[in-house]
Image (spheres, helix red, strand yellow):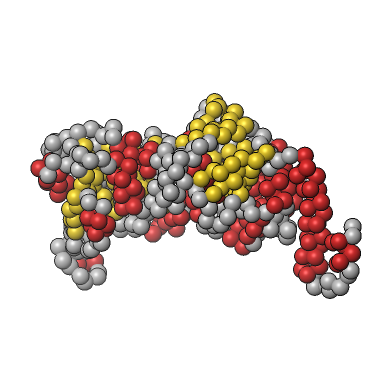
């Protein structure tokens, strides 16, 4: 029987990830089991039973959950062997971020939530620092720069771990994780095995049931704060700063030559007869009715689909120095900032994580270009959480153009962001990106070299923008400029009382 340990902070998405991985591994003959460790109660066993997964539950109650885990895990493995399981997974929540559930020679996975804050990887103990694989969840709802900084912080905390992005809701990335689980060793029991790190230690009066506060009641293994040492420690650094003395190293650039999309199937299971190759410097617009599957295509490209997504598509990359975790930058509609820092500090932090030499120059450059894209200008000292939707998207486009290592950029409905879309595309192409844009905007659609038409979840056809459409685009831009003038008139509190019929119908 193969055995794998899963750990991670509460609500990081461990159960969802495990279920998606098991779904990827399932076949007619395989039997899977999970031992769920928690403190007081759990409802995850219901989800496992619904998925026809053998499940055991261990609740530590008033005992230390870490010690409860290690006292029972060998019995759980033996139980799994008796049940004839092919794979047993232990799931434990690091309630104090100090737990040490990983065992030498046993594949160890840590699941961490990117919404928990960029400093979280350095706050988590052995369950992250000694894991073989670190799974990052919820990366689809934060900014691209924060995803890159978060992954950098994870790598700082555990340089040897393999980092994977997995979406617990859609299952993106679960297939790649399942391949790693297939490499886990088979065991019969854990007798004689050793933990990768010691468990938290305590044997004091409170462990034995004492409830009264006071030194007279504190006996056994206790630990006190040295307040004098705390007061004299003046070297307090910003929680979001990186080491100013970080060694500057040369990063080998990822070189993308082309990307090829091999068709899967539509929502009814009908074959998607397509093989589309896109080269560097192209802008590909994705069009179709709401709900047709435009965002799904972007998601397939983002996770480098290997036939493991709902569409069954395969995405192939032709290039050099490829790193699957850094190929794609995603600028989604629901992008949020969770870091409470200024725009300038945000860019500087991203630049430091990328080992950029001229941080001051790149910071000024990104703010400058972001302001050229945004409808309303902002300064580098404004908090990023105070930016409007348009300002946020403009900042992320400029940041992606100049700082992101990702050579492929995915943009979901940029027309809703209040940015200069023509300038945005020009900037990204100038910096050597392949750009995919999901849009309902006819101007944006014609700005692309090609447009993919989506129907019922599949690529229906690919249209190459021709010269007549380019001519019509010029007229559409003139109309759009008129609409921009009207919007600015409203913003400035003026009247729209000119001869609009003449402007729109006779010029």
Q: Is residue 248 above or below residue 119?
A: above
Instruction: Please state if 23 lies on the left or on the right of 411 as rendered.
Output: left
Instruction: Please state if 113 lies on the left or on the right of 455 as rendered.
Output: left
Query: Going by the picture, which residue comes out furthest to the top?
Result: 320
| Residue at 28% from the left image edge and 34% from the top image edge | 182
Q: How many numbered marks does the figure carry?
A: 0
Q: Quadrant of the C terminus?
A: bottom right
| Residue at 44% from the left image edge and 52% from the top image edge | 138
Q: Quadrant of the N terminus?
A: top left
Expressed as whole percent of the image width and height from the top left, the position of residue 367 reads 69, 50
Expressed as whole percent of the image width and height from the top left, the position of residue 115 reads 46, 55
Name the one closer to the observer, 279 or 249: 279
Name the one closer to the observer, 473 or 177: 473
**Residue 395 appears in the figure:** yes
Q: Give the quadrant of residue 502.
A: bottom right
Query: Going by the picture, which residue comes out furthest to the left?
Result: 82
| Residue at 23% from the left image edge and 41% from the top image edge | 28
Expressed as whole percent of the image width and height from the top left, the position of residue 179 reads 34, 35
Instruction: Please state if 192 lies on the left or on the right of 486 as rendered.
Output: left
Instruction: Please state if 10 lies on the left or on the right of 263 as rendered.
Output: left
| Residue at 68% from the left image edge and 42% from the top image edge | 448
Expressed as whole percent of the image width and height from the top left, the position of residue 64 reads 21, 56
């Amino acid at each position: 029987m193969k055995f794998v340990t899963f750990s991670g902070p509460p609500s990081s998405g461990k159960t969802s990830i495990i279920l998606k991985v098991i779904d990827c591994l399932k076949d007619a003959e395989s039997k899977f089991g999970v031992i769920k460790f928690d403190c007081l109660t759990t409802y995850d066993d219901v989800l496992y039973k619904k998925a026809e997964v053998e499940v055991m539950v261990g609740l530590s109650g008033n005992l230390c959950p870490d010690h409860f885990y290690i006292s029972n895990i060998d019995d759980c493995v033996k139980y799994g062997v008796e049940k004839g399981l092919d794979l047993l997974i232990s799931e434990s929540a690091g309630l104090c971020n100090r737990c040490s559930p990983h065992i030498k020679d046993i594949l160890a996975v840590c699941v961490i939530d990117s919404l928990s804050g960029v400093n979280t990887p350095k706050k988590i103990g052995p369950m992250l620092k000694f894991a073989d694989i670190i799974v990052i969840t919820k990366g689809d709802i934060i900014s691209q720069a924060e995803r890159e900084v978060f992954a950098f912080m994870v790598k700082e905390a555990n340089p040897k771990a393999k980092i994977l992005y997995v979406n617990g809701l859609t299952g993106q990335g679960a297939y790649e994780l399942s391949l790693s689980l297939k490499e886990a060793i088979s065991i019969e029991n854990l007798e004689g095995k050793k933990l990768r790190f010691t468990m938290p230690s305590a044997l004091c009066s409170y462990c034995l049931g004492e409830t009264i506060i006071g030194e007279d009641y504190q006996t056994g293994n206790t630990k006190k704060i040295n307040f004098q040492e705390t007061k004299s420690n003046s070297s307090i650094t910003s929680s979001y700063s990186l080491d100013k003395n970080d060694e500057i190293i040369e990063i080998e650039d990822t070189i993308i030559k082309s990307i090829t999309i091999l068709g899967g199937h539509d929502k009814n299971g009908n074959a998607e007869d397509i093989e589309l190759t896109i080269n560097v410097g192209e802008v590909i617009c994705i069009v179709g009715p709401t709900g047709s599957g435009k965002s799904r295509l972007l998601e397939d490209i983002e996770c480098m689909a290997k036939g493991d997504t709902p569409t069954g598509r395969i995405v192939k990359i032709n290039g050099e120095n490829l790193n699957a975790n850094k190929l794609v930058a995603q600028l989604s509609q629901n992008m949020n900032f969770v870091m409470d820092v200024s725009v300038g500090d945000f860019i500087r932090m991203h630049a430091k994580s990328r080992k950029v030499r001229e941080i001051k120059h790149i910071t000024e450059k990104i703010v400058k270009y972001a302001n050229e894209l945004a409808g309303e200008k902002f300064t580098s000292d404004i908090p990023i959480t105070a930016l409007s939707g348009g300002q946020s998207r403009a900042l992320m486009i400029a940041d992606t153009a100049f700082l992101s290592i990702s050579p492929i950029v995915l943009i979901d409905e940029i027309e809703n962001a209040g940015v200069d879309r023509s300038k945005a595309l020009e900037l990204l192409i100038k910096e050597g990106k392949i750009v995919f844009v999901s849009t309902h905007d006819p101007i944006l659609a014609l700005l692309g070299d090609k447009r993919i038409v989506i129907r019922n979840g599949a690529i229906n056809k690919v249209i190459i923008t021709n010269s007549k459409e380019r001519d019509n685009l010029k007229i559409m831009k003139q109309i759009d400029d008129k609409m921009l003038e009207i919007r600015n008139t409203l913003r400035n509190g003026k009247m729209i009382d000119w001869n609009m019929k003449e402007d729109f119908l006779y010029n």
